[in-house]
Image (cartoon, grey):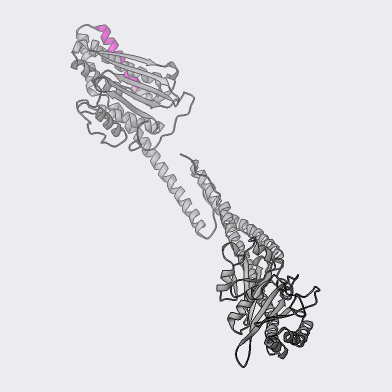
Amino acid sequence: MRRRRFYSIQVTIAMAIASLSVIIIVGAILIAFRVTEETARISSGVYTRQLVRQITNNIEFYIDYLYSASTLLQSDGGVREYLDAAADSDRDTAAANALPTLSGMIATRQDIALIGIFGFKGGCLLAGPPQGGDAAEGSGPGPGLNPFIVPEAQSWYETARNKRGEAVISSSHVQNIIQNQYPWVISLSREIFDPETGEGKGVLLLDLNFRIIERICSSIQLGRRGYIFIIDRNGEIVYHPQQQLLYSGLKGENISRILESREGYFAGERDDRDTYYSIQTMASTGWKVVAVNYRSEFAENRESIRRTYTFWGLFFFTASMLISIILSRRISKPIMKLRRSMMAVEQGNFDVTADIPAQNEIGELGAGFNIMVAEIKKLLRRITQEQEQKRKSELNALQMQINPHFLYNTLDSVIWMAEQGKQDEVIDMSSALARLFRISISKGKEIIEVAQEIEHVRSYLTIQKIRYKDKLDYRIEVDEQILRFRIVKIILQPLVENAIYHGVKNAAKFGGETSRCTVTISGFRTGKGMDLIVGDNGAGMSAEILLRIQRSLRGEASVHKPVSADGVFRPSNPGSGVGIRNVDERIKLYFGNEYGLGFESREDEGTKVFIHLPAISGEDPLPPLRGASAEGSGGLP
């Protein structure tokens, strides 16, 4: 059986306290770090939303100015005169009157990149910062119109016509309507109507310099990686610091969630959980200003906080380990003392006591242990006396089991041979009978040498040979190296008696004088001890009877109940069943349950009885008595 691994209770208690401390410390650090991060996130969120609101206000200021400028230009007399002019000469004169207003507005507001008036009756009036270059033919004063661009085909033109006078703000785009100029702008366009007739006169275009928005958004720092971008109400990018990466597909933004979100602040999902979005919607345009920052940057001193928590965590862990060691020693000390007392009792020392003064459960356990040891001492003393008496009784029972009929028949044979004048046979039988009883008594010794046991059974066989003459033969072949080993006496004679009975029965069955009973006794050394074997060529046993005998030896059948008319336990063979059982029990009583009798038998082929014994020489100490008999002790070896 595999021995269970031993764990010291002191180590177990220390590990338990240390594990609990680790769980509490790590949990406290994680909670504190999470609270710190959450506080930083809330603070960062509030600060970011304030920045986004400020940026939104600044951009709306420029957009509102575009609205105001478009309204002012729509009502300007020079502009209306220009749109009403049908002839080119009249249009040139009107352009000269309207251009100062446009140029003055450009001069005072550097954030306006272009002002354009496109009449439905023809002609266009453009005003912008001086860039050089020649004006296109028919374009009038100011920047020249790109000859390859048709204004009516531009999206801002078409949207303005569709909105019927409502101002329209476009997303950021490259304005290519000016010859040799391609600035990034945000365009406001609207259709100009005649206030009296409601008739459309033309389209007004105001381009806001995109760099203004870029400068406003890039001026805000949101950590090392944070940034701000703007989308319109359709999800188109108005401004993004990494706009080229977006257009090339190397970067993406959660545009759909931003458009659908009714919250002003939310975290990313799945692989984007470290990202937080702060959103502010412009009332005038529907644009959304979005600030992006990262959890890892909420706390600027994140690494410093982590190091601080780690240091204090290790400090408290070390302190908890020291405390756990001290407490475990204090708790385990009386337990270890009780364990040492128990180990002493395990080794057979019942004079120990567990001196545990603790006024707790362990102290009560020690007191109970002392009472238990005292009771065990008394019980062992009583069992020893009972076993001693039982040994004597078993020996007496075995000696009484020498078949009285055998003694009577032997004496009758002596008388009969004396009357017949067979002096030599009388002497041989009387001598054998004397040796038989002398070894049986053996001066009260219960352990004798194998040689003496062989001499005892040889005397028994000599007597039986004289009685049965040619019906009986025997052989004794015992290895000399086991003759000096010691065994329990009178274990072969009951087995030989049983073998002779079955051998003679077999001889009668197959013709009497022509069949002979042969009993063999052999012995040899084995790896675990030695074996003595008693065999015969008798009637043998069936598998069922053999199984019942083995069960009987294991204590599963009644000791005195006969097995079968063909088995070893039979009323017609008085005492033989009890003798075999007694032999097996006495072997187990002295040497343990791993020793005893084993049977091999087949019908009409004979029986072999194996006696498994330890190899105990004359110098070895005798084994202690094993306590109770072998009843119910398990199977055969």
> 309 or 41, which is in the foreground?
41
> 312 or 501, which is in the foreground?
312
Q: Quadrant of residue 236?
A: bottom right
> 427 or 504, which is in the foreground?
504
Residue 385 position (above or below residue 183)? above
Q: Quadrant of residue 504?
A: top left
Q: Is residue 623 visible?
A: yes
Q: Which quarter of the rendering shows the N terminus?
A: top left
* Residue 533: x %, y % from top left: 35, 21
Q: Which quarter of the rendering shows the C terminus?
A: top left
* Residue 529: x %, y % from top left: 44, 25
> 248 or 509, which is in the foreground?
248
* Residue 104: x %, y % from top left: 78, 85
Is 302 left or right of 234, judged from the image as shown?
right
Of all residues, the one furthest to the bottom in this rendering is: 196
| Residue appearing at x 18%, y 17% in the figure | 509
Q: Say if the magenta span includes residue 437.
A: yes
**Most common SS among magenta residues:** helix
Magenta stretch?
Answer: 421-439
Q: Is residue 433 visible?
A: no
Q: Say if the magenta span includes residue 506.
A: no
Residue 209 position (above or below residue 442)? below
Is 154 left or right of 440, judged from the image as shown?
right
Residue 169 position (above or below residue 493)? below
Is 471 left or right of 10, judged from the image as shown?
left
Q: How many marks?
A: 0
* Residue 191: x %, y % from top left: 63, 83
